[in-house]
């Protein structure tokens, strides 16, 4: 099938409308009207994620479907076949900087194509502790660099006289270290902030966050190889640069204060693997820095160069972006120099299932909520509160321990809760809020934390659902 079935941000999944119009899915070249089947689907309304699309990529994830019984059921709903669609005439121009982008999962929901930015369907996010690599959200500012691994070196601008290391040397000379960490874009859940007042930025839903096991070389170990002692080196910042460059030649860059690098020490990793596989191109192949507990923007992908500096990275993204402001600051009076760069992130949570606008089962008396909770700085999640009445009354969700310790808790915590719905209500609001080990809590509404770039949107997460009587 040559058609592009990827949903766009505009076609956000709206279950009730889909149901009204009839639900068609594609398998192979068959088109199936499954409107009648939805009520019998053992996985409930999850099937609606595939409405209007090919069901195959979903079955790659939910693989229980690939059996004869299901194929037989499917056949009874076939209403037609897709004819071979002529391939679009080659529109890729040879000088399109985006002509060498990687192949991506059709499940990703793009918020922009060039550069490519996308989040997975939020319902799939809380299903797995480790987000599968091809579902991990993608946040690129520039075209994905093409790297020839034979020629690649990682450059440390240090006056030690030791040569740059090749990829092979990096993977063979040093022990492999791993850290399981969530990475979150500062703009995760920005779309809720937009409802208060417009902001500049990609319209992210709640899935600009993912969790993976990253493996590679410990930064501290690498520095020791260069005879650099991170505790005594005379500088204020450590700077990371990527291979992706702006039209003027300047690379994507970020920095963190050396004080923070010293605190994290062996936990900062130059990763070459993600969930046991080579780092995918979208996530930084061949190398990326992983600074656990810190905002996505500093997790420099396609890592090429590391150096120490008396000042922060001079990149646009360090100096003119990824900073917080109060809600009376707007573009006419903003002074980026006066605000601190976002680094460790505040506590956040979200309901992944059900989704906003979902119709629950007829006459349902209970609802099962699933989601994630996470806090920056390695602060573990100690409690997740959920409400089925807009925040009037609260229940404690069951946490799925992430296996990490309270002050080195870099992975997210998935949680689940079965809670009663308000009696007789035909619509209600589900809410979640999390508490981290420092008893930091989430603000109850987004208005007070509105900021012009729509960053740090971590208010209580609210999902409206209907309950047909
Ligand atoms: N590194 C480079 N070199 N170029 C980039 O555009 N984007 C950053 C960060 N590292 C970026 C980068 C931002 S803003 C985020 S949120 C994360 O990468 C996203 O990582 P992911 O695409 O692996 O999810
Ligand atoms: Mo980001």
Image (cartoon, rainbow, N blue to C red):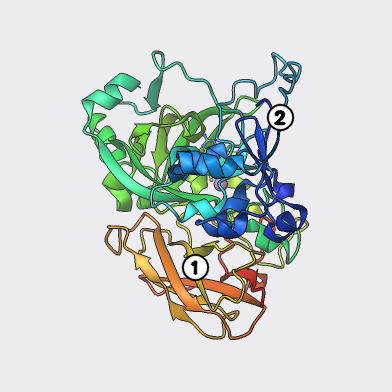
Q: Is residue 421 left or right of residue 453?
A: left
Classify 288 as above or below 417.
above
The span from disc 1 to disc 2 (Cα, nearest Å) is: 37 Å
Quadrant including the N terminus: top right
Please name whichever residue, 409 or 341, is drawn nearer the observer in this view of the structure: 409
Q: Provide residue 281's location: percent of width, then percent of height.
A: 49, 29
Q: Is residue 25 left or right of residue 217?
A: right
State which mark lies toward you, 1 or 2. 2
Q: Which residue is mark 1?
A: 369
User: What residue is drawn where x is 64% and y is 66%?
Assistant: 359
Q: Provide residue 323's location: percent of width, then percent of height.
A: 59, 54
Q: Provide residue 330's location: percent of width, then percent of height.
A: 74, 60
Q: Which residue is mark 2?
A: 82
Q: Residues within 10 Å of mark 2 (few under 14, many from 20)?
A: few
Q: Is residue 155 left or right of residue 73?
A: left
What kind of element bears circle 1?
strand
Please name whichever residue, 65 or 265, is drawn nearer the observer in this view of the structure: 65
Determine whether the beta carbon of the residue marked 2 sits less than 8 angstroms from the nearest atom of ligand 1. Answer: no
Please name whichever residue, 38 or 445, is drawn nearer the observer in this view of the structure: 38
Please name whichever residue, 271 or 210, is drawn nearer the observer in this view of the structure: 210
């Amino acid at each position: 099938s040559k058609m592009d079935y990827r949903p766009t941000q505009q076609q956000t999944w709206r279950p009730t409308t889909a149901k009204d119009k009839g639900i068609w899915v594609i398998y192979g070249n068959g088109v199936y009207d499954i409107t009648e089947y939805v009520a019998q689907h053992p996985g409930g309304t999850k099937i609606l994620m595939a409405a209007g699309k090919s069901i195959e990529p979903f079955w790659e994830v939910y693989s229980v479907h690939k059996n004869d019984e299901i194929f037989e059921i499917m056949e009874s709903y076939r209403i037609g076949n897709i004819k071979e669609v002529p391939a679009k005439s080659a529109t890729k121009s040879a000088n399109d900087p985006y002509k060498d982008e990687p192949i991506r999962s059709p499940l990703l929901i793009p918020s922009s194509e060039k550069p490519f930015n996308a989040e997975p369907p939020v319902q799939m996010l809380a299903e797995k502790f480790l987000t599968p690599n091809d579902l991990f959200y993608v946040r690129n500012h520039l075209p994905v660099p093409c790297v020839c691994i034979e020629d690649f070196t990682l450059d440390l601008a240090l006056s030690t006289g030791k040569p740059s290391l090749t990829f092979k040397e990096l993977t063979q000379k040093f022990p492999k270290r791993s850290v399981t960490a969530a990475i979150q874009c500062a703009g995760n859940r920005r779309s809720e902030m937009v409802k208060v007042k417009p902001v500049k930025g990609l319209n992210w839903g709640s899935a600009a966050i993912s969790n993976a096991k990253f493996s590679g070389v410990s930064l501290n170990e690498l520095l020791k190889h260069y005879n650099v002692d991170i505790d005594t080196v005379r500088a204020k910042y450590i700077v990371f640069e990527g291979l992706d460059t702006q039209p003027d030649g300047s690379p994507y860059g970020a920095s963190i204060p050396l004080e923070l690098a010293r605190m994290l020490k062996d936990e900062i990793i130059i990763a070459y693997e993600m969930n046991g596989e080579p780092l995918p191109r979208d996530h930084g192949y061949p190398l990326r820095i992983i600074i656990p507990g810190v905002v996505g923007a500093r997790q420099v992908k396609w890592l090429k160069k590391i150096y120490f500096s008396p000042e922060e990275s001079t990149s646009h993204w360090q100096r003119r972006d990824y900073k917080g402001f109060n809600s009376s600051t707007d573009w006419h009076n903003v002074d980026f120099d006066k605000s601190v760069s976002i680094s460790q992130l505040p506590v956040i949570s979200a309901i992944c299932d059900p989704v906003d606008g979902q119709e629950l089962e007829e006459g349902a008396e209970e609802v099962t909520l699933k989601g994630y909770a996470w806090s920056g700085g390695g602060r573990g999640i100690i409690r997740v509160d959920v409400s089925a009445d807009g925040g009037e009354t609260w229940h404690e969700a069951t946490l799925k321990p992430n296996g990490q310790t309270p002050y080195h808790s870099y992975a997210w915590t998935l949680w689940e809760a079965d809670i009663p719905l308000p009696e007789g209500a035909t619509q209600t609001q589900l809410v979640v809020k999390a508490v981290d080990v420092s008893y930091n809590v989430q603000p109850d509404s987004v208005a007070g934390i509105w900021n012009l770039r729509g960053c740090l949107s971590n208010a209580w997460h609210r999902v409206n659902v209907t309950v047909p009587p």
